[in-house]
Image (cartoon, rainbow, N blue to C red):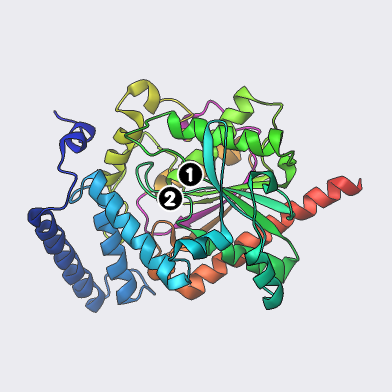
Amino acid sequence: MTSAISQNQNAVKYWTPIAFSRMFIYLTANILRTTVRKIFGRTPKGQALHEGIMVQLLRIVMGGSILNIAQSRTMMNISNSVVHLKTGTFLQSSKDKWATPVKGQGWKGFWIPFKDQVNKDQLKKDLAKKHSVTDIGSGCDIVMFAIHGGGMVMGDALMFLNSYRAWMKVLQQKHNVKIGVLSVEYSLSPEVPFPGALNECVAAYKHLIEHQGVDPRRVVMCGDSAGGNLCLTTALKIRDAYPSVGLPAGQVLFSPWVMCPKPLKDNLDDYITVTGGTLFVEAYTQNQAKIHASPYASPIQAATLAGMPRMQIFIGGVETLRPSIERFIVKATAEGVEIESHLKEGKSHDYPLIEEISGRKVVREAHELIAKFVARVRDDYVGVLEE
C-alpha cells in the first residue's frame, strides 16, 4: 500500500482546476452540514455559526484528504497573511518593527524583544530600535522560547506574532512582567524529517542558555500542536543528553501533539482529522517504527517524565487529540510533573490562539491564564535570587 508520504512526493504541487473544484465542493458540503447541525442544535454549545464555518475551512488545510502538503502550505500561508493583515503586521516592514531575524549554529528564528505597549510614546521608541542576535534574552524578565505548530510540515515562526504581542501587553499591565520571545524557525518535513526539527530546537535552546547566558529558571517554553510536541521532546533531550544546560522553568502547551500510539477518532467539530494526523506523522517519521517508538518523537512513550518542568496545558473539549493529551497528563502527573490543565468545552484544536474559531472573550481569558502562569515563574525566580 502506497504511504501518504510517497503519495505527496509524487503529487502535483501546483493548483489545478480539479484541486480548486474538490476544495470548493468539500467546503460547500461542510458549510451546509455545519449550518444544518447548527439549526438543529448539534454543534458545540456557544459556538457561533461563523466560528463553525472557520473550523471547516481549517479542516481543508489540516485534514489531509483534499490537499497535498504543498497545497496545504499555500493555504496556511494565505491564512496567516489574512491574520497579519487584520493585526497590522502584513507588510514585512511592520514585522521588522517587532521581530529581528536571528540565527546560530544549527538553528534560526526571530527575537521579539519586549516592547512597552502601555506607554504609546515609549512604544514608538521601542519599535524604532534596531536589534541583533546579541540582544537575545536582554531587556526582559522572562524569555518565552516559542515553537510553532503546523503538523511539522507547515507554518512559520511569526504565525502567532499577534499572540506574543498580546501576552507581552497583559503581562506588563497586570503583573509588571516584561517578556521577550525567541521563536524558532525550524525546518519542515518531509524535506527535513526527524530528528531535523528537534535538533534545531535543541540547538536554539542551548544557544539561549550557553551563549546568551540566560538563566533557564527564567525561560518558559511555549508551543502549539506539533510545536507542543517539540517543546516536550526538546526538554526531554536536554534532560537526558545535556543535563548541565538546565531545563526551562515551565512550558505553556496548546493542544500538544504527544503522538500517542493509540488510534485517534475524528470529531466533526475539530479541524484536526485522523487522515491529516496520519499524513503529518508519516511526513515527520518517514513511517519508521523505531522513530514512532522514540520518546523524542512520541513524548508520551518516554520511560519516565520525571524531572520535566511544570506545565500549563490547554485542551479543546471537542478536539481530536483530547484523549491522547489527557492520557499524557495522567502519566506526567503520576510521575511527579506539576501540571495546570485547562479544558474548554465546545472548543477545538489550538482554541486559545485562534480568535476566529473561539471568540475574543475566550482567547482573552486564555491570555490571562497564561500571564498568571508566567508571572508565577518570574516570582519564583526572583524568590531564588533573594534567598
Quadrant in the picture for the N terminus? top left
- Is residue 326 magenta-colored? no
- Up-down: is 326 above or below 1? below
- Residue 117 locus on image (x, y percent): 65, 71
Quadrant in the picture for the C terminus? top right
- Residue 286 locus on image (x, y percent): 31, 28
Q: In this rendered view, identify the residue nearer to me: 159 or 27.
A: 159
Amino acid at the residue labelled 2: Asp
- On screen, residue 20 versus residue 78, left or right, reads left
- Residue 36 locus on image (x, y percent): 19, 74
What is the crowding at mark 2: few (fewer than 14 residues within 10 Å), some, or many (at least 20)? many
Q: In this rendered view, identify the residue nearer to me: 29 or 319.
A: 29
Q: In this rendered view, identify the residue nearer to me: 162 or 323.
A: 162
Amino acid at the residue labelled 1: Glu
| Numbered label attached to residue 185 | 1
Q: At 49% across and 33% down in the image, what residue appears?
A: 198
Label 2 sits on a secondary structure element that is loop
- Label 2 with label 1: CB-CB less than 8 Å: yes
Q: At 68% across and 46% down in the image, what residue appears?
A: 219
- Up-down: is 231 above or below 43? above
In the figure, residue 305 lies in which quadrant? top right
Which residues are drawn in magenta? 300-320
Q: In this rendered view, identify the residue nearer to me: 270 or 45.
A: 270
Label 1 sits on a secondary structure element that is loop
* Dot 2 or dot 1, earlier in sequence: 2
What is the crowding at mark 1: few (fewer than 14 residues within 10 Å), some, or many (at least 20)? many
- Residue on which the image places disc 2: 156
Residue 107 is at least partly visible in this image: yes
Q: At 15% across and 43% down in the image, what residue appears?
A: 12
In the figure, residue 37 lies in which quadrant? bottom left
